[in-house]
Image: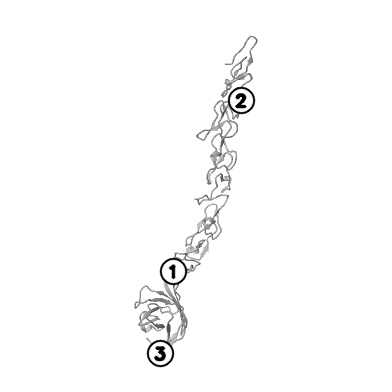
Amino acid sequence: MHGIRCMRILTWSLCLHFTLGCLETEREGVEYLDMTWTDCSGAQSIRLLKQSSLHNGREHFEGLDLGTLTTRSLYYQDGDWGLSKTLGDPLNFDDQKVQSTSMTVPDFSLWVLWCDGTPQSGNMQYIRSNCYACGFNKITPPGSNICQCRAGQYPGFGGRGFCKYCPANTYKDSPSNAACSPCGDYATSAAGSTSYSNCVCGLQKIRPPGSNICQCRAGQSPDSSVVDGVCENCPISTYKDSPSDASCTSCPNNSIQPLTGSTSASDCLCRAGYTKTGGGLCTQCESGKFKPGISDASCTTCPENTFSQPCPVCAGASACTPCPENSISAAGSGTITACQCKNGFSGENGGVCSMCGGGKYSVAS
C-alpha cells in the first residue's frame, strides 16, 4: 500500500445506475458493473460480475481485463474499496480505491486513482445492472428471462442466428426460439405472420369452427376432374350436410334433389308415384292410388271408373288411368280388371264392352 504522503484526493465523476427492470431487448442475469476509467495508459474499461461469495463480509466483483488478459477484482480491503489484480492482496491494491465502510460499492464518493505509485487525475464511471443485451434481434417477453425471437420470427442458421421473418405460408403466434408452424394444406399466409388466422384457405375452402383444416363447405365438394380441385356445388340429386373434402352423397332411391348445392338429405324429394314413409324412404304408391309431381306428399286414392297399377308397372304414371269405354270401377281400383262392363254391356273385365243384342240385358255386378 502506498504512503498517505503521496496521495492526492481527486473528485471523480461517478455515474451509478440501478435498473428497475430489463428492457424488452435485454435479459436478466448475474448482476454486473460496467466500469470505465482513464489511467496512465489511457482509457480503460471492464465488466465485473458480482460473485456469489463475500469478501470481508461485503460484495465482491470480478472480471477479465481484455487489454492485459488479467483478472481484476473489485472488493473491500482494510477500510478501502478498490480495483486490484489480486483478490485480498493489499500490495496490488493500487489501481483505484476510496476509503469507505459501505457494505456495497460506494456511490458518489471521492476516488483515488493510482498509476505507477502516484495518484492521477481522471474520472471513473460505472453502470450497475443485471440486464444483458439479447442480440440477434431477440427480445425477452414479459415474465421471461430468455432471449428469444418475436412472434412471426424464428432463429436462422439452425436456431443459432439472427431472428428472421417466418417464411410465407407459415406463422408463429408467440415469442420463442422454435420454428414457425406451417399453415397446412390449401392455406397461404404472408411472411412474418403472427397468427394462424393469417393463414387463408384457398380453392374456395373454409376452416370450420374448431378445425384447423381447410375444406369444402357443406353443399360443396372438390372438383374431381383435377388434382386439388376448387370446391363446387353438389350436383342435382346429391347433397353434403357438413364441411369436408368428401364427395357429395346421392339422394336415396326414388328421390330427386332438383337444385345444386344441397346441404341436407331432407332436400331429396320423392319422385312421382312415390311417397315418403316414416323411415324416410320413398316407397311406391299402393295399387289404386297415385301421386303426381316431385314431393313427399301422401298418395291419393284413384276416383271411380279409373285404376292405377303400382310402379314399376305404372312406369312412373302420375295419375289414374280411365277404365275402357262403357266400363266402370270402384274408387281406389288397383288393376284394369277391376273395370267391369256397365249395365246393358257385356265383355271381359278390363276388356272391350259390347252392347247387348235385342231381347238381352246385363247388370254390372
Could you tell whether 240 is left or right of 131 in the image? right
Residue kind at label 3, given as amino acid type = Cys
- From what the image shows, is residue 126 above or below residue 160? below
* Left or right placement of residue 339 versus residue 126 in this view: right
Q: Counting residues from the N terminus, which is met first, the one under dot 1 or under dot 2?
A: 1
Cα–Cα gap, marks 3 and 2: 137 Å
Quadrant of image for the N terminus: bottom left
Residue 34 place in picture, x, y as percent: 45, 76
Find numbered disc 1 in the image and state the secondary structure of the residue it sits on: strand
Rendered location of residue 31, percent (x, y):
42, 72
Looking at the image, which residue sits at the far left?
56
Q: Residues within 10 Å of mark 1 (few under 14, many from 20)?
A: some
Q: Please report contact status of discs 3 and 2: CB closer than 8 Å, yes or no.
A: no
Label 3: element kind: helix
- Mark-to-mark CA distance, 3 and 1: 43 Å
Q: Which of marks 1 and 3 precedes in the sequence?
A: 3
Q: Residue 28, labelled with which disc?
A: 1
Q: Residue furthest bottom?
A: 5
Residue displayed at 36% across by 84% down:
91
Amino acid at the residue labelled 2: Thr
